[in-house]
Amino acid sequence: MHLHNRTGGKQSQQGFWEKASKKVIIKKLVIYLFLSVVSLSCIYPFLFMFSTSLKATMNIFSSPMELIPAKPTLENYAYLFRTLPILRWISNSFIVAAAVTLVKIVIDSMAGYTFARRIFFLKNLIFVLILGTLMIPAAVTLIPSFLIIKRLKLLNTYWGLIIPPLSFPLGVFLLRQYMSTIPYELEDAARIDGCSAFDIYARLFFPLSAPAITVLTIFTFMQQWISLLWPVIVTSSTEMNTLTVGVARLKAESSGVNWGLIMSANTISLLPIIIVFLFLQRYFIEGMTAGSLKG
Amino acid sequence: MRISAKTLHENLVSYLFLSPILLFFIVFMLIPLAWTIYLSFFAGGILQGLRFAGINNFLTLFRNRIFLTSLRVTGIYVVIIIPVVIAISLFLAVLVVDRHIRGKNVFKVALFFPNLAPMVVLAVLWYFIIHPEIGMFNIVLRSLKISPPNWLGSSSYALAAIILLELWRGVGFYMVIYIAALIAIPNELYEAAIIDGAMGFRRLTRITLPLIRPTLLFTLVMATIWNFQFFDSVFVLTRGGPANSTSSVVWYIYANAFQYDKLGFASTMAVVLMVIILILSLLQFKFLRSDFYY
Amino acid sequence: MVDLWSAQYAFAGQFADLGSAGYATQVKDGYPELLWAIPFINGHQYGIPFAADPRMFFYNKDIFDKAGLSYPTDAWTWDSFLEQAKKITTKEHFGFVLPSTYAGRGYLDYFTWLWNNGGEVLNEKMTEARINSPEAVGALEYVLKMFREGIVPPHGLYDNVSQEDFFMRGGAASANMRGITIATIRNDFPNLKWGLVRPPKGKKAQYGLGSWGFYALAEKCPNKAQAWEWLKYITSKDITVRYVGAVGMYPARKDTGLYADDPERQVFLKNMPYAKNIFIHPKGEEIFQVWWTEMELAIMGKKNAQQASNDAAKAVNQLLQE
């Protein structure tokens, strides 16, 4: 595409930019295409899952690739709700996740404040200890935690589900990190005003750490919501199943027979998260990756 | 050294604040950790009773074929997934962040979507997708004239199926992290490089990669620790089979503790797992943290 | 109520010995000997047999009609089974379905074939593996033929439960299914025309697979006498008839008179004496796992039958000696 022109130099520069913009357009197209294909393949299975949940089992086998069911039916959902305590499962998951999150917000922020701002005996030792355990795989604490909960007779109860996860100390770091950035002047001012340590924590540090606390909330909530290893060991009755355990056991028991039912259970499991996600997108993503930038 | 009443009071208050987390931490982190190490020297379980076995467990551990297989399976899984996932998600992140691309958020959400679901839900969905009869993945493969293997029924391909599952999920997760890291790089640096005539690839290697190095390191360590413990997909899809070809270490620990009633042996494996992970993490930190400029 | 999978508890002394407590003799006569012997472990009577879910071979009459083959009878042999299954396998359906996953206890079906050829996993005293005896290897080779000749679906697809659904949908001409599926067929697949037949006659036997549940008393129970009365009550004739009848299982008691007017279920009842049970061993779970791993390797073609059986025997023996 060489255009000869009387103004020589300028034209070549123009030619350069023309070529560049054409390159840019091609590049854009390719990237869009690629990204779209990848994105679609990430999402498509879920659309498919939803559509399968609306098909009668017969149709699932006869026309498996059909995305929009020809004869949509709610019978899978009806069967689901009739035979399985899925609402109970969802509320179990919610209760556990919410309880763990709420308690963690309080105790982790308290600890975060203490490490960020207070001086005390053995501070460094305890901190390093807590830091070290972050790398310990869950499998290591599993068995004794199980034995302890068993001794306390809390197997297959809400307490058994809620209490052990409270020991995971990520929140302490997150909040310590954030709280360290709160200016000393504010704290001094509060002290001059005669605030007790608790006041300083509750009225000053806690509110000011809202971003970090939001991140912690989402992270903890999601972590509990999707957790499988611990709940599957602690629960032994169908009613106490959390959602993940229920879905896992459902698959194990019906093992690929009643796809419509399984897909409907899957869909129901996802619904609460999707709804929350739509509203809290920004916080959500940040929360789930737990501010790993600061890592 | 005189300790003033004030210091004592201050310390007391601090510990008061710490006490809740310390309580849970000690009871459900430290004590179990110590207890597991203690149990690793015993054989037996809840029903059969425990008997002291000294270092016997550790000795037989490395002669136990299934444990060695589990190590191998876990190793293959980690070695394949980590480079592939990180490369792909980094690549995707670079694409999405490109200033010429609109609709960044749409792509972000779409690719991150699988992470909203618990692994269990993903695994069940995946099982449906790779079903020999009605699985859409196989239908697509067949239309491309590739005859799909019997995924979960074949000891050669079952692990591949599980790896693909984690790739599907992981790509969006790490991409989002890298996007945030990439956005943090100030544009001026790129503009300066363009003026200096640096082509795309050089910009990538000389500016981008070094600047996101901390994030890369972090995700590398995180991914290693996380993937080394894979369990959920095995639990749902294969239960360690066929023929132990998908038996991850955590799965084998679970089976021993809760199916074969061999708590002692399971604890021994847990201790070994922990040591492996610690060593891996330390190694990664050591090798990749050096010459940390900027 | 516990089942064979909870036998570990018996070995751990968690169950009360009903025999020595003098309870057992009160009810013993109401049960056939073979069944009474099942919860008799290690020389002690640990439970009262209650109900079972034995299996029989179901066959799909429509598929047989279409293929122009006569229905199988109890006299069919391993050879005639294989032949007929080969003839009847088409693109639409398999001749038979053999679950073979470890998950979902798919290996249970294999026992029928193993036993009928005279093979066993362990010896009588349960101290040594017998899985590499010629009979056992022969059974494995026969099963491998089923996979090689394509008369059963590929390995790893179906387990205990999903194989039943597969049959009911017409995926296979025959299947070894639990008695409880009669209710499912009647409810959900009323158009299915089916028949019952015993497993093909093996060289040594014609056993079916049974899975028994029994009631046991906890050893730690503080009030044994009362608990025993309760046990007697829930295994009494009335309760048994109501409970077992309602779920469609089969009772252990001799005198229930259940299913008198249900010819198909009668077939199951009649064949209960031939329903053998899998062995009970404290390390049972792990034994199944290591043994079946080798079987899977043979099915997937990674080892031949003799090799797999030898390796299985080695692994099981190692376990037994631990």
Image: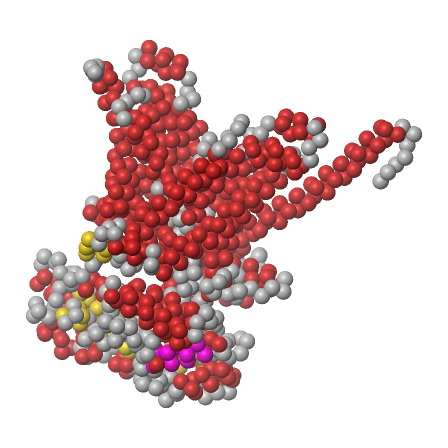
User: Residue placed farthest to the top in the image?
Assistant: A192
Give the residue displayed 9% in from the left and 61% down from the top: C224
Q: Nearer the viewer, residue C285 or A87?
A: C285
Q: Is residue C317 left or right of residue B209?
A: left
Q: How many marks?
A: 0
Image coordinates of residue A249 in percent, x first then y, are 37, 57
Does residue B198 appear in the picture of this structure? yes
Give the residue displayed 26% in from the left and 50% down from the top: B40
What predominant SS class does the magenta segment belong to? helix
Quarter of the image that includes the C terminus of chain C: bottom left
Q: Quadrant of residue B194?
A: top right
Give the residue displayed 42% in from the left and 29% down from the top: A212
Quarter of the image that includes the N terminus of chain C: bottom left
Does residue A159 appear in the picture of this structure? no
Q: Quadrant of residue B99?
A: top right
User: Residue placed farthest to the right in the image?
Assistant: A6
Q: Nearer the viewer, residue C290 or C189?
A: C290
Image coordinates of residue C87 in percent, x first then y, are 50, 84
Give the residue displayed 43% in from the left and 60% down from the top: B245
Image coordinates of residue B207 in percent, x first then y, are 60, 32
- B15 falls in the magenta region: no
- C137 falls in the magenta region: yes
Q: Quadrant of residue B33?
A: top left
Q: Which residues are magenta?
A: C135-145
Q: Nearer the viewer, residue A163 or C263?
A: A163
